[in-house]
Each structure stands twice: as structure tokens, then as C-alpha cells.
Amino acid sequence: MSNYGTPYDDSFRTLLTDCKRLIVPLVNEMFGENWQETENVELYQNEVFITTGADEKRITDSNFTIGNSRRYHIECQSSVDGTMTVRIFEYSTQIAITTAESDVSKTVFTMPASGILYLRCNDSTPDSHEIVVNTPGGTVSYKIPIVKIKDYSLDDMLSKKLFFLIPFYFFNYSLEKMEKDHALIEDMKNTYLKLWDQLESLVQQGKISEFEKSAIKAMCDKVAQSLTNKYDNVKEGVDSVMGGEILDYEAKRIRNESRNESNIEAVYNMLVANVDESVVQRMYPEQFEAGKKRFVSSKHVNV
């Protein structure tokens, strides 16, 4: 019930924020939808306030719309938790409150389509949870679909375009067995080396971008590093095959630098066009000084 996420929550949110189109096939798989990957995905605030005697802020794993219409809410859960359904309902109702529509006679609360991604589960974990709400006007019930990582091989993830799930595949390994068996560590390493080749092939085919490939690899590393903290032999194998990618991965840094350079160029061009400096500064506060410096330098050169 903590407000602070695990490394797995962080990986889920990071991948959703940086590569949001990758969530679309997971939504289709989880909810039986048929969205195209080109549909617009809009992310919304994921902080909600729950009143339990005192106001408490919690962070949902996702709150987004696809196609500027239907809203979704997916929670990433590392293990089966008896309180999960209650938390799903708490988050969903808070989202419904923020999107409520009212007129003089009525208020409409629209619940998002909610689902759970279980990273670990057992044989008794159902394929869905049911929420039943008894209201003065009658009883309402609906299903919360569940996707379980253990049900998907890497080939499944690749063939179904469930690239969003790839970083969490490492949960399918028995680390206790692997720690004692070097052959299992070698099998794991070969599996990921093959995966990197497959991801590169997808880039060459134009099915994912170079940035998305780097993001997936970085989150694979983050999840694996967190899971192997107590397993020295496995961790050594992970280090050798994943290359120590970090959350603020290189591709993200390059992309941000590219955007920054583009904005500096925009400042420069606007000043050349005699746009008022105060207007330019309001539009690009972080890049204004660098853009102005380039503009001033160019005037001196021209002189």
C-alpha cells in the first residue's frame, strides 16, 4: 500500500511514458480490443488521493486513453495480493471522479477499463477478478481482466507484438535453481543474446524504433538487476549479457539532447525573424539563452 513504487513499477511507468505506443497491443490482449498501433495514446495524471481517516496520496501505474476516447487503467503487480481488487476500485473511482460530467439533474461517473498485469502468480490465480457494487439503484458488476507473465514465452511476446511485456519475462526464471547450475545461467544468457538479435531485426523491419529497442533493453536490465541482488552467480551472468543498461538509458539521453538542440534552433530562427524576445523566452525558457547566444554570434559574423 506504499506510495513508493518498486523497480518493476518504475520500469512499467518508464516504458509507458517513453514508448507509449507499445501499450496498445497489451491493451488489445488484455481487454479484447482491436486498436491500431497508430492510435493516439494520451497519458494522464497518475496520482490519486484516497481518504482513509486522513488524505493519502497514492500513485497508480497508469491512467491513459487510446484514440482520444476510451480510458484505461492497468496496474503492474509483482505478486498476488488480496488487497489488489480493493486498490483497483479505489483508483478507478478516483479517476471517474476527475472525469465526471454534471448537469443540473445528474452526474455521470465513467469508470476506466481496469486490468492487472501479474508478474508472479500461482495456479489458483484467476483469469479475472470481479467487482460487485451494491447501490441504492441496484447491483452493478464488472470484470477486471488479468494478464500473467508466466503464460507468455518470448516468442509469444514477439509474435503478438507484446513488446511491453519483454522486460518482465525474467520473472519466469527460477533464480534459486539457476544460482546452483551454471548451465542454466548459460541458457539464460543465450536466450537474451538471441532476443537482442530479434529486437535488432525488428528495428531493421521498421516494426520498432531504435529508441524503443534501447528502452526495452534498458528495462530488461533494470528488472533483472533488481531480481538478482541476492544471487551472485546469476547477477554475473546478467551483467555479461545485458551490459549494465540504466534507467536513464543512452538512447533517451540522445533523444533529449536532440530535442534540446532543435529548440535552440527554433529560438535562433525566431530571433532572426524579429519575434519579440519576451515571447520567445516564454515559449522556450530552457533554451532561450543558448539560442540568443547563437543569434548574437551570427550577427557578429555577418558584420
Image (cartoon, rainbow, N blue to C red):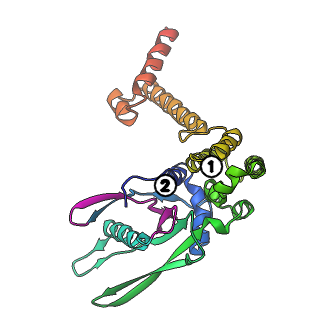
Secondary structure under badge 2? helix
Tell whether 289 sits left or right of 19: left
- Check residue 78 for magenta coloring: yes
Range shown magenta = 52-81
- Check residue 236 for magenta coloring: no
Mark 1 is on which residue type? Cys
Front position in the image: 44 or 213: 213
Say which mark, if any, is on residue 145.
none
Q: Residues within 10 Å of mark 2 (few under 14, many from 20)?
A: many
Instruction: Please give the name of the residue rendered at 32% of the width and 65% of the height, measured from the top-left corner.
Output: 98
Residue 160, compared with residue 127, is above or below; it is above
Quarter of the rendering containing residue 140:
bottom left
Q: Is residue 204 visible?
A: no
Say which mark, if any, is on residue 220.
1
Residue extending furthest toward the front: 180
Residue 230 % position (x, y)? 57, 47
Mark 2 is on which residue type? Asp
Gap between marks 2 and 1, in whole Å? 13 Å
Front position in the image: 276 or 14: 14
Residue extending furthest toward the bottom: 138
Q: Is residue 268 visible?
A: yes
Residue 28 % position (x, y)? 60, 69
Dot 2 or dot 1, earlier in sequence: 2
Quarter of the rendering containing residue 51:
bottom left
Residue 244 % position (x, y)? 62, 38
User: Can you say which quadrant of the picture contains the N terminus?
Assistant: bottom left
Tell whether 98 sits left or right of 211: left
Front position in the image: 83 or 94: 83
Instruction: Please give the name of the residue rendered at 43% of the width and 25% of the height, measured from the top-left corner.
Output: 271
What residue is shown with label 2?
9
Tell whether 237 sits left or right of 10: right
